[in-house]
Image (tube, helix red, strand yellow):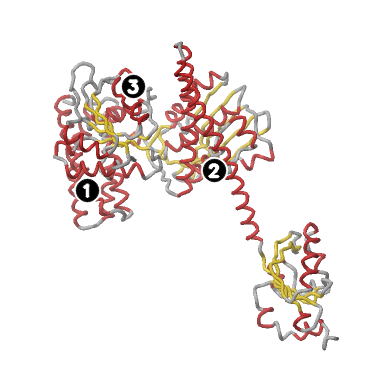
Amino acid sequence: MKPDKNLSDYVKEGSFYKAVVEDGSDIIFIVDYYGNILYHNPSVEETLGHEPGSLINRNFFNYVEPETLATLREDFEKSTTRPYDENVEFRFLCKDGSFKYLEFNSINLKHKENLEGLILDCRDISQRKKDAEELLRAQKAKEQFLANMSHEIRTPINGIAGMANLLFEATSEQDRFQYLNAIKHSTENLKVIINDILDLSVIESGKLKFETIGFNIKYQLGAVVDTFIYQSKERGINLGYSISPEVDHVLLGDPVRLNQILINLISNALKFTHIGEIRIDVELDRKEGSEYWVKFDVSDTGVGIPEEKVDKIFDSFTQADESVTRRYGGTGLGLSIVKQLVELQNGSITVQSRENQGTRFIFTIPYQFGSEKDLIHPRGRSSTIQAGSHSFAGLKVLLVEDNDINRLYALNILKKWDCTVDQAENGYTALEKLKAHEYDIILMDVQMPIMDGYEATKSIRKTFPVSKREIPIIALTANAIKGDNEKCIELGMNDYLPKPFQPEDLYKVLTKFVAETTETPNAHVEIVTDLTYLKNVCNGDKVFMKEMVETFIKNTPVAINEMQKWLNEAEWGEVGKVAHKIKPSITFMGIDRLKPLIKSIEEFGKENYNTDRIPGLIETFSTECQKAIDELNVILERDLV
């Protein structure tokens, strides 16, 4: 049967498509069964760049990407035999020479109008294809990451288990020392892996917050380099640094995150440098208004990165080559974390590398310049604490920990310091022991069966007699994600100690609340303040120190009263402002235990968040400040006369 009209006449009539086709957003082609284009709508120009009418009488297949042409011809042939077809993908040539992913649904005019032609309703699916490719890439990267993690975590665990078995059988002191060293090395590797994963999770969750505090860049960089000196000497690598006088100054920013960036880059350089040197050079890149852009250049003479791999090294879960993981180990997260930490501080980072010649990482971060009064640490280099030689003779400790190994570890450390230790496996047992006995301090694990550390702490703070209600409680927490530590303070704990911890970490926390003794049993008292920082700031000037202490004693009660006033009026923003004003004086007086508390009050007030907790926090803060003031009055009469 012959058609009543031909396809060209059908197109020319035009009435069927004016409203939908001409004015629609989809790309419309009308083609015959041979692919000859008889019509295309204005959207072709908007999406593909071809001017109106410019493709008429051209062949559709001449504009299809050659690699996809054979497949499309097959699909097109099938469409000519069906009344309707859909989701046929292809790549079409744009005016600028690029190809775009399109997808068509077709209407066969043979079945509608008895004409041998197709209406192709096309959509641009470039973004969808890009998203799918990115998703596939991410999935493959994460699969590789999980494979790496499986290997990386199993390796130190197998080492620990194997060395522990050998340790049981060891007969010589030298063998025992060697096996213990191997166990320690494996645990450090495991800790690095876990920290990388935690850091990335915090960054990607958007919960990472940056401090703006004073620090001395020479002190920070020197302390970081010191941690790698032994390792670099052991491997015969020269490790050095230089700081331009223009930036040898007090800066305002986040020194902890700067340390993290430098540690990642230096450890990465050590991993891939077998001969030569590693250098860190710091200088002023530029000044923009009150911002000083400080440039850090970390260079090495290591194996370098192949040119085609350089762009990938900042991606999460990836390394320059999969063989890198097998040979050197690592999570493939370190450089991704570095890049994100730099960029979250409005900085930038680049890499330059040549195979077998070395690599340079150059990053810049904007800082404000500060002064000595902004410092939170003394300029001098901190020394490592030799915790094994200390004594807390007669100190009564309640150790609450459900894990046998963790409990044994802490117990042995405390016994070396001459503490009297009582143990509990959960919060409920701890409460029963506290009812029956007197303790000077409680080390409280957070996650335990029957009753966890949070519930036990709340019960102690609310239901016990005053003498026991105010006992210092130190949280032992494996929850390293930001926010969990603040929760410990909000629920009534005095401080927290992340696990796994070293003996010196436990020592530092204990000395905040008890005094070390070497002779007199029971000579332990709670120390609230530490004027070491103030002494350094004042260069030992007792007159200046006295003025600072007297100012704190005079002004703090006034500030607390003001905070209470705004609290009564539910003016949370004003409460936060007063808390912000108090913070520096807390630092000057060295009342470290109150820093998380006043920070929570400030943040909750300013953000109008968790306001139901603010009254309790202020009450605790007021009580602790009174203890500090009592202590400072004694110091004024005894030491600052």
Crowding near pointer 1: few (<14 within 10 Å), some, many (20+)?
Answer: some
- Secondary structure beneath disc 3? helix
Tell me the amino acid under the disc marked 1: Gly
Q: Amino acid at mark 2?
A: Ser
C-alpha span from label 3 to label 2: 40 Å
Residue 463 percent coordinates (x, y): 17, 44
Disc 3 from disc 1: Cα separation: 35 Å
Residue 586 placement (x, y as % from top left): 26, 38
Quadrant (top left, top right, bottom left, bottom right) of the C terminus: top left
Disc 2 target residue: 348
Quarter of the image for residue 102 reads bottom right
Q: Nearer the viewer, residue 547 or 89?
A: 89
**Sequence-wise, which precedes: disc 1 or disc 2?**
2
Q: Is residue 9 above or below residue 493?
A: below
Q: Is residue 63 left or right of residue 366?
A: right
| Residue found farthest to the right | 2
* Sequence-first tag of 3 and 2: 2
Q: In the image, what residue type sits under mark 3? A: Ala
Side of 242 where 144 appears, left or right: right
- Name the residue beneath numbered marker 1: 616
Relative image position of residue 573 (x, y in whole percent): 28, 55
How many other residues sit within 10 Å of disc 2, few (<14), some (14-19) or many (≥20)?
some
- Residue annotated with mark 3: 387
Task: Give the total of numbered labels.
Answer: 3
Q: Residues within 10 Å of mark 3 (few under 14, many from 20)?
A: some
Do callouts 3 and 2 mark residues in contact (Cβ within 8 Å)? no
